[in-house]
Amino acid sequence: MSRPLASIAALLCSLVLISAAATIDPQTLGPKVGERAPDFSLRDQQGTPRTLRSTFGPKGVVLVFFRSADW
Amino acid sequence: MTREGLGLVAVSYDPVPVLADFASRRAITFPLLSDAGSAVIKQYGILNTTVAPTSATYGIPFPGTFVLDRDGIVTSRHFEAAYQERDTITSVLVRRGAKLARPVTKITAPHVTLTTYATDDVAAPGTHFAVVIEGVPGRRVHVYAPGVVGYKPIALAVEPQPGLVVRDAQFPAAEDYFFAPLNEHVPVYQRPFRIVQDLEIDPSPEASGALKDRREMRIAATLAYQACDDKVCFAPQSAPITWTIALRPLDRERAAPRP
């Protein structure tokens, strides 16, 4: 899919999602069991860039997404 | 968790200084990653789309937890509908089959050595935790597993009470036991087994009245089972069990205002 088309599709999807807000089931979102979780790089609390991969222990990692540390 | 060989990392849409402040207030040493702009939250497809883009809270994810193996493959995941809800790390580990170094209480019961513990000492509204019962059948003794017909299966009944949500219990896979005199196959536990009962402190506004000013919650349950050895079947038993969990209110502390 070309980039403009993809963004239009994404926009339409998000509009549908917003209208269906009350019925979103987070269980259906994001990587599923058996799928690979994409790697990424973000700054940690010291401001140091960290990849997801760098946080792994020998057997993997517990990756938590939380709302906010601010409120 | 380190003993389990797992790392721990947490991602939010907060800027680095908010995470730094939070980490120092809570003495957090594991990485808190700043996804300001929510690119990763969007990449993962878990942006909370119920928040209006004009809102200050736009960019938050649906809160949840993924457990990844060493290759980055999701081995388990947990997402909740209400923001207050979250699993304790200890209950995540227990559901994965980990052994926790928790103080255990012995349950007085015949034919089976039973011990129990709660995964956590403290819980707040929305906390998902678990109670664990470990059983070791006596010599040549078996107890009947869930699904057995003609005998009393092992069952855990948690007494309902306001403020407590009783969720699913995990029972291990049963072993097949062949009883020759009756030529029957029955599902049993004859080796050490473990039951994990998921519980939650009810985060709903209706429950807040019941939980208001409570410092602790006493949780009571009955474990029913029937034990037999290779000659005799003993009378069905029911063992009372209690756990006490300290309650704390939902944390509403914020970062200090930034200049």
Image (cartoon, coloured by chain):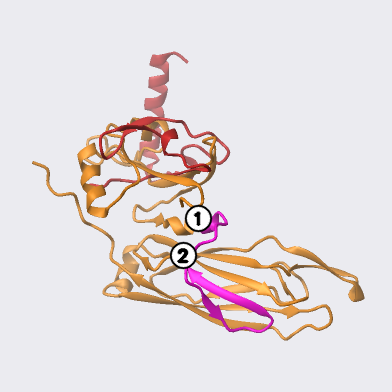
Q: Quadrant of the C terminus of chain B?
A: top left
In the rendered image, residue B202, in percent from the top left (x then y), is placed at 38, 65
Q: Give the range drawn in magenta.
A: B93-119
Which is more toward the observer, A57 or B117?
A57
Kind of residue at disc 1: Leu
User: Which residue is the site of mark 2?
Assistant: B119
Dot 2 amino acid type: Thr
Vertical comparison of B18 with B81: above or below = above
On the image, which quarter does residue B211 sit in? bottom left
* Rendered colour, chain A: red
Chain on which label 1 sits: B
Tell me the distance, in whole angstroms, between the alpha carbons under discs 2 and 1: 9 Å
What tint does the image give chain B? orange
Residue drawn at (33%, 67%) of the image: B206
Residue drawn 50% across the image and 37% down it:
A31
Element on which disc 1 rests: helix
Query: At which x and y percent is residue B43?
Result: 41, 30
Tell me which residue sits at (50%, 62%) in the image: B100
Q: Which label was assigned to residue B93?
A: 1
In the image, taking residue B186 as reference, residue B71 lies left or right, namely left
Foreground residue among B116 and B179: B116
- Look at the numbered discs 2 and 1 and tell me whether their residues touch, using CB distance below 8 Å: yes
Q: Do the residues at discs 2 and 1 belong to one chain? A: yes
Residue A18 image offset from top left, x and y in percent: 35, 37
Q: How many labels does the image show?
A: 2
- Which quadrant of the figure has residue A13? top left
